[in-house]
Amino acid sequence: MMPSSGRRVFAAASRELSDPDHVNSDLCRPFLRTLPITGAAISTLGPPFGTETVCASDDRAAQIDEFQFDLGEGPCWEALSTRRPVISADIRNPSAAWPMFVRAIEATDIGGLFAFPMFIGSLNIGAVDLYSTRPGNLSMSQIDDASALVALAARQVLRRALLARPGVPDAIDDEGYSRRLVHQATGMLLAQLDLPAADALLVLRGYAFSHGRTVRDVATDVVARKITFPAEYDGS
């Protein structure tokens, strides 16, 4: 069990990542404070938000992202495709599943590398890469803590991605009907994706952005059952 001081650090990191008003805060810092790692990088991967580094704690963390972006392989891609943490106690282990990526980092001092998927419901967002200069594993409790922080970071990344695009078609009329429609659609997403209300609305907005539509229009189709989100994001 983590000492009480460690739990306080984790609680503080969780609060920092949960604050929707901290749109300019460093999303990597809470991971560095909480976990026995050297560096961290957070990235979006593929549609709908593109492939780019959101934040990196240092040049080495940024380089880890760049190698994976350029090569199209690596732990971040595997984490997102499997929706499971990828834990590499020694990234140079010859059994590693990403031969080109492993060759690319041979000249670096990276030892352990840990990738965690970022998603909300069925909406894929990206991944968080954590590295250590020494080989070694994370404990199960540390993996659980990292996963909890990644889930909070996913919400912040989605919020920032939407706020950063002034052209996002997110218009919702002040008329009561439009707001009721969005609330109704959000409620349906709650059931479809088993999400809290705030996250369901984020998914609704993310879908609207990725399809160049307004939230109101998407809400109309959700209520009419023309859109069901598991089908949309699972490709069925």
Image: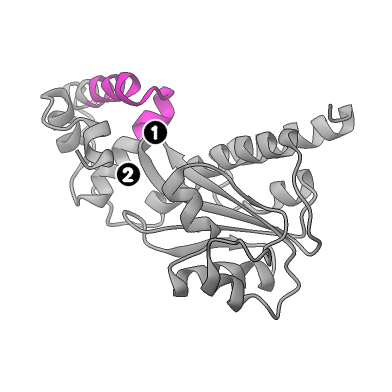
**Amino acid type of the residue tagged 1 in the rendering:** Gly
Q: In the rendering, which numbered label is found on residue 121?
A: 1
* Above/below status of 126 relative to 177: below
Residue at the spot of label 2: 206
> Badge 1 local density, few (<14 within 10 Å), some, or many (20+)?
some
Residue at image x 59%, y 78%? 104
Question: Which residues, given as a range, are shown in magenta?
Answer: 182-201
Q: Amino acid at mark 2?
A: Gly
Instruction: Tell me where residue 236 appears, x and y as whole percent.
Output: 19, 38
Query: Considering only vertical position in the picture, is 86 above or below 73?
Result: above
The answer, for residue 184, to whether it is visible in the render is: yes
Q: Is residue 194 magenta?
A: yes
Decide if residue 127 is on the left or right side of residue 186: right
Q: Quadrant of residue 142?
A: top right
The picture places residue 89, in percent across and down from the top left corner, at 72, 54
Residue at x-position 70% and y-position 81%: 107
Percent of width and height locating residue 184: 24, 19
Q: Is residue 170 visible?
A: no
Q: Which of the image's four quarters has the N terminus?
A: top right
Residue 58 falls within the magenta-colored stretch: no
